[in-house]
Amino acid sequence: MTQYIIRGGKPLNGTVTISGAKNAAVAILPATLLVNGTCRIENVPDISDVHLLLEILDRMGAEIRRLSPNTLEISCVHVRDSEASDTLVRRIRASYYLIGAQLGRFGHARVALPGGCNFGARPIDQHIKGFEAIGADVTLSNGFVCATAPEEGLTGGRVNLDVVSVGATMNIMIGAVLANGTTIIENAAKEPHIVDLANFLNAMGAKVSGAGTDTIKVRGVRSLHGGSYSIIPDQIEAGTYMAAVAAVGGNVLIQNVIPKHMDCISAKLREMGAKVTEYDDAIRVQRTGILRRANVKTLPYPGFPTDMQPQIAVCMSLASGVSVITESIYDTRFGYCAELNRMGAAIKVETKVAVITGVEQLHGCTVHACDLRAGAAMVIAGLAADGTTVVEEIEYIERGYENIISKLEGLGASIKRVETPSRRSVHAAG
């Protein structure tokens, strides 16, 4: 069993560099299946979700060269018309992008329903609606999504998403780039990683327009060619370090960011009393005084991201007054609140609302990472708490944060990654 051991109470100071965007990378990598050539992709985050996708592609026959820890060359020219590994697919949510990629490449796909973080049902009905709009026949059977294009191939269509869905928007884009005719996605999500996927596809010869607005047009092309592309910085990783400085105190320059992407997070931290200074490709966050209460409602971009909800909750737990978080994206994302309460926080949850009464101090104890972003919140809480915090189930955290230990150590944090015998093995040995 691997744990993080954190000795809290030390302010964060120095400089940290943000890695490539996880949510862009996990869509761009499956999209390489569509490319008739070699893709050179830079700024790829070195995280476990990426490792899983690369292993899936490798087993399907992709030729992958790692030129550096964050630069890859991928050629899927000789990929076999085969199913992705069920075992691997079930370990990562983003594996559903393989449906769109295989449907576009081979005219059919059979992909196991994906796994990932467990914080409530995240149905793929909007993905299916989009694939059916471009002519595919889609069924769910025995834990698999099966999609088949007609003999004449996929044909452009119009889909109006019932809800704003990041995953469905990206998956439909991937499935439509090689279709005949034009596909129009209405009520599309606008997140930065959607724009990044569109830019990647266009760099390889696709014709995608409107990404970043609520209407995206995909004009089908006959083929995609190889090329080079660099993934954007990770908005949520940057926001996590910003929240950490606000919660713990200190002065940190966060490099390799797009400040515009951070507007909603920067505004909320300023409202709470942190000083946030923007530069061309960096943000400085400083906090010396007491944080003030605030209210947050998670919304699709450009609103406050649901993926930053647990991290801002830690800041609110240490702020003066009563703060309220309203979660409008996922119904059951407050599982981490029980862990924070064990550290001395005062959070009451009722369905989609968390009421947080600020306390003077959190106290170290053993806590669990319930999911990726909840795990990041546990790390922030441990950094802010007095005493020692042990964070378990850190595999969730390492799905989305590259070199989190070395980055935090570089800011003066006391955090170690340790291997300990599992409780089961200790019991067996006894």
Image (tube, rainbow, N blue to C red):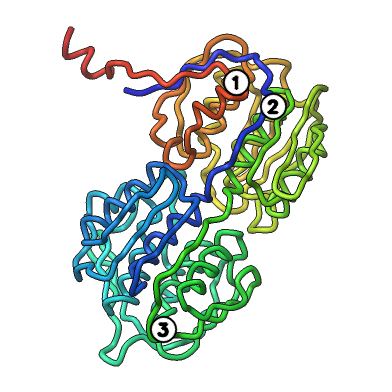
- Cα separation, mark 2 vs mark 3, equals 47 Å
Tell me where residue 37 appears, x and y as whole percent.
34, 71
Of the two numbered discs 2 and 1 on the same chain, state the one appearing first in sequence. Answer: 2
Tell me the residue that label 2 is attached to: 247
Vertically, is 180 above or below 93? below
Q: Amino acid at mark 2?
A: Ala
In the displayed structure image, the side of residue 420 where residue 184 appears, left or right: right
Q: Residues within 10 Å of mark 3 (few under 14, many from 20)?
A: many
Vertically, is 368 above or below 111? above
Marks 2 and 1 close (CB-CB < 8 Å): yes
Tell me the residue that label 1 is attached to: 383
Quadrant in the picture for residue 40: bottom left
- Cα separation, mark 2 vs mark 1, equals 8 Å
Tell me where residue 307 appears, x and y as whole percent.
57, 46
Of the two numbered discs 3 and 1 on the same chain, state the one appearing first in sequence. Answer: 3
Q: Residues within 10 Å of mark 2 (few under 14, many from 20)?
A: many
Residue occupying the far left of the picture: 429
Q: Could you tell me which secondary element the residue under label 1 belongs to?
A: helix
Marks 2 and 3 close (CB-CB < 8 Å): no
Tell me the residue that label 3 is attached to: 134
Q: Residue at x 47, y 39 (%)?
A: 372
Residue occupying the far front of the picture: 67
Q: Amino acid at mark 3?
A: Ile
Q: Quadrant of the N terminus?
A: top left
Q: Quadrant of the C terminus?
A: top left
Of the two numbered discs 2 and 3 on the same chain, state the one appearing first in sequence. Answer: 3
In the displayed structure image, the side of residue 255 where residue 4 appears, left or right: left
Looking at this view, is 93 or 75 the one in front? 75
